[in-house]
Amino acid sequence: MPPIANDPVMDVFAKLDLKMIALLLDVDGTIIDIGPSPTEVHVSDALVESLRRLFDLTGGAMALVSGRPIADLDRLFSPVRLPAVGGHGAEMRVDENKVFYWAKPLPEDLRKCLADRATLGPDILVEDKRYSLALHYRSAPEQAKHVLHHVKTCRAAFPDEPTELLLGKAMVEILRPGISKGESTRKLMAHPPFSGRIPVFIGDDVTDESVFRVLPEIGGKGFSVNRHFPGLTGIFKDPAHVRDALNTLVANGQTAA
């Protein structure tokens, strides 16, 4: 589908200079559509090829910034392996030789409590990332209060274990305090080939707020998908709109080269 005529966000995005920016992309709800579960999403060959070309055109200054673990991102976008901030900032890969981990695993007993199927019921999807655990209720939105009560009970059973809650789209995640996409993005931008470039981030959810807050401090530009955040440069309609914009960047970058 071609870009919409007189599309303000597309016009601004298309003028970005790939030799000057670092392109930072959230995944679910931003470059791919939200699926029934984290394992039921579609990644097209065309998107993988766009990411590969953008990685080359930016000189490697492109990264995925996601709540998913990096290993999951590699599976989704195989055979492409990109720099990444994974697990909402718990881990970061600059390149194959520079992988950082900012969190230790949650205790197994706490994760077992949170994942207790007898209490949760069959409609709640458990995503155990070891250093965090997410409970998805996309297929049962009426269970939101029940899930939050269950999480509160489990956290109370481990009073000496510091944890935080992260609320997303039909999801609650329990993770270590201090984990932040924003702070890990700041750290990523200190490493070549990201350092010295203008960070350009696209995100879609409240889980991306920490990145949007950091962007003004590091001279960045923020774009969102169908949601307002303070200080945005532009808002895309949906992930398809973002994919069109990425394709436009590829075309413009190849022409400039």
Image: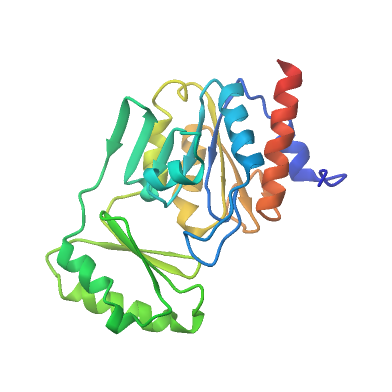
Tell me which corner region of the image, top left, top right, bottom left or bottom right, holds residue 121. bottom left
Q: At 59% across and 35% down in the image, what residue appears?
A: 51
How many marks on residues?
A: 0
In the foreground, 215 or 74: 74
Residue 59 image point, x, y percent: 54, 20
Indicate whether 160 appears above or below 89: below
Tell me which corner region of the image, top left, top right, bottom left or bottom right, holds residue 161. bottom left
Look at the image and name its color scheme: rainbow
Residue sticking out furthest to the left: 160
Residue 10 appears left or right of 206:
right
Q: At 39% across and 24% down in the image, what residue appears?
A: 191
Residue sticking out furthest to the top: 257
In the foreground, 125 or 255: 125
Residue 143 image point, x, y percent: 44, 82
Tell me which corner region of the image, top left, top right, bottom left or bottom right, holds residue 2. top right
Indicate whether 200 appears above or below 154: above
Residue 123 image point, x, y percent: 43, 79
In the foreground, 198 or 111: 111
Q: At 59% across and 47% down in the image, what residue appears?
A: 231
Residue 238 appears left or right of 61:
right
Residue 64 image point, x, y percent: 49, 40
Q: Quadrant of the C terminus?
A: top right
